[in-house]
Image (cartoon, grey):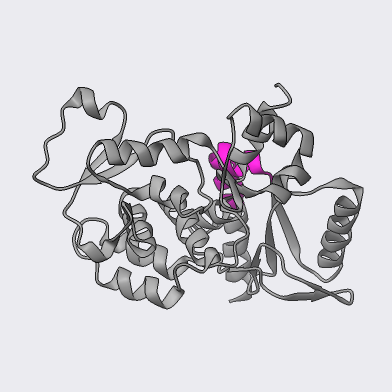
């Protein structure tokens, strides 16, 4: 991997959007500057984005449509599970686009009210709902979490808007709205939470407060009933020996206080979700058996 390409891959890992400080911390200032100079990363206000994020806006304009779904999420500078490789564009139901003109663009036919469009892009709340209706749950949850984290959408607004959705995708819209939180730090944590939520044995809260050995901790996911914490743990999101030492201290304190700490890496959650599900299925079985003994 070239010096200029490393920040590109790191930016993808972060969800396609990052501040200069964040990307420099995880790579180096020299490499980030090289990637920008080579056109591999572009500046968008105070954020750094992949160049395809800006190109997709031009695609929407060329097709006479509105930038939407994951492409709109990127436009609003939200982190997503996987940055879209091809534009998502919404066009009117009566429009007819030739296949060769569309190419690999993800075209959705829908008539949008003016209130749902902001400068050629679906509004923040419409973007979250569109993603919730069409994407798989973990991708949709990552978008909703990012929207709440950005402050552009509120939890109350999202729940109310999801309640008004009718037809296909309405149920998932409501589920995404109910589970979304701005406390998740990144799509990595959002995707892990989405997988954990598949198991009714676990009742988790993101960034729950836990006191252990005179420390106040906020693990990624806390299951108080079963005394389990789930950590989205990856070296890409930690830097240096000091951060590693702090993690060791945190996990030791949790263990001494009686918490079971389950740690998953970025690669496991994002690339090997079946492994994560397998571990959780075994753990859920232990929880069920323990509940039967206590009954």
Q: With respect to residue 168, does 236 lie above or below?
A: above
Image x and y of residue 250, in percent: 84, 63
Q: Which of the 4 image quadrants contains residue 9?
A: top right
Q: Which residues are magenta?
A: 265-282
Q: With respect to residue 229, does 281 lie above or below?
A: above
Q: Is residue 136 visible?
A: no
Membership of 284 in magenta stretch? no
- Which residue occupies 66% across, 38% down? 10
Image x and y of residue 145, in percent: 51, 61
- Which residue occupies 59% across, 62% down? 184
- Which residue occupies 26% across, 66% down? 115
**Number of numbered callouts drawn:** 0
Q: In the displayed structure, does residue 87 sit left or right of residue 290?
A: left
Image x and y of residue 196, in percent: 54, 57
Q: Which of the 4 image quadrants contains residue 63?
A: top left
Q: With respect to residue 174, does 77 lie above or below?
A: above
């Amino acid at each position: 991997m070239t010096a200029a390409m490393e920040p590109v891959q790191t930016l993808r890992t972060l969800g396609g959007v990052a501040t200069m400080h964040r990307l420099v911390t995880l790579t180096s200032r020299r490499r980030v500057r090289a990637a920008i100079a080579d056109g591999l990363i572009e500046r968008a206000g105070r954020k750094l984005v992949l160049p395809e994020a800006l190109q997709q806006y031009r695609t929407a304009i060329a097709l006479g449509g509105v930038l939407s779904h994951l492409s709109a999420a990127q436009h609003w500078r939200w982190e997503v599970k996987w940055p879209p490789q091809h534009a998502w564009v919404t066009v009117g139901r009566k429009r007819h686009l030739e296949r060769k003109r569309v190419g690999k663009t993800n075209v959705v036919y829908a008539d949008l009210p003016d209130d749902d469009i902001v400068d050629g892009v679906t509004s923040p709340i419409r973007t979250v709902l569109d993603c919730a209706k069409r994407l798989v749950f973990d991708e949709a949850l990552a978008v909703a979490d990012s929207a709440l984290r950005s402050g552009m959408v509120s939890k109350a607004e999202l729940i109310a808007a999801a309640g008004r959705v009718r037809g296909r995708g309405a149920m998932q819209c409501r589920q995404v709205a109910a589970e979304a939180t701005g406390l998740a730090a990144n799509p990595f944590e959002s995707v892990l939470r989405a997988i954990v939520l598949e198991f009714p044995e676990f009742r988790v809260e993101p960034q729950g407060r836990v006191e252990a050995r005179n420390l106040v901790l906020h693990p990624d996911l806390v299951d108080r009933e079963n005394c389990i914490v789930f950590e989205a743990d990856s070296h890409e999101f930690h830097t240096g020996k000091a951060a590693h030492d702090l993690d060791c201290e945190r996990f030791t304190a949790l263990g001494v206080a009686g918490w079971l700490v389950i740690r998953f890496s970025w690669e496991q959650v994002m690339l090997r979700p079946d492994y994560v599900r397998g571990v959780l299925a075994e753990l859920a079985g232990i929880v069920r058996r323990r509940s039967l003994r206590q009954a």
